[in-house]
Amino acid sequence: MLTIGSLALGVSDMSRAVAFWTAALDYVPRGGLVGDDWTVLVPAGGREGAQLALGLSESPIQEEPRVHLDLYAGDAEEQAAEVERLVALGAERVDWKRYPENPDFVVLACPDGNRFCVIDTSRS
């Protein structure tokens, strides 16, 4: 049976991407290794969680990507605090034209432009 091993993101600047995602998620490079064109990040301290693989890519950013990360916050207050923390780390707010009325998510872009959402899970 197959299982998902890693979620992979294309990045244009490996050191910048590693710095952002390790701080954003409290992850560390697997085995302490940061490659020039490929790095796998894992939860710090041996916690369980999905791996995030970062691969050097020259492909353009998709304005409305078909695949993206959803990061979960426990409630609206935590969501707001996490959005501000991520923006302080270098993420940017995305002017998302597809927001529904009263959304439970906020769309951000990492420093490489990859879109991701911060979800208020108390509303689901």
Image (cartoon, rainbow, N blue to C red):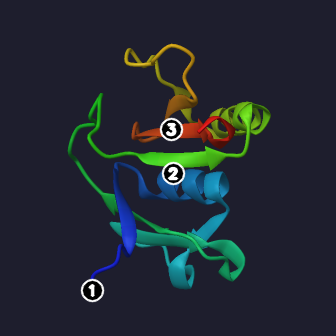
Q: Position of residue 38 (x, y in %)?
A: 35, 69
Amino acid type, callout 2: Arg
Which numbered circle lies on residue 1?
Answer: 1
Q: Reading the chain from its start, which is encountered first: label 2 or label 3?
A: 2
Q: Residue at x 52, y 79 (%)?
A: 30
Which quadrant of the figure has residue 56?
bottom left
Q: Residue at x 39, y 70 (%)?
A: 6
Q: Is residue 51 left or right of residue 74?
A: left
Q: Position of residue 69 (x, y in %)?
A: 44, 48
Q: How many marks?
A: 3
Q: Is residue 52 left or right of residue 31?
A: left
Q: Which residue is mark 3?
A: 117
Amino acid type, callout 3: Cys
Give the farthest residue toward the left: 59
Which quadrant of the figure has residue 119?
top right
Q: Which residue is mark 2?
A: 16
The mark lying in front, picked from 1 and 2, is 1
Element marked by disc 3: strand
Element marked by disc 1: loop
Which image quadrant: the C terminus?
top right
Q: Reading the chain from its start, which is encountered first: label 1 or label 2?
A: 1
- Residue 52 visible here: yes
Q: Is residue 37 left or right of residue 75?
A: left
Element marked by disc 2: helix
Amino acid type, callout 1: Met
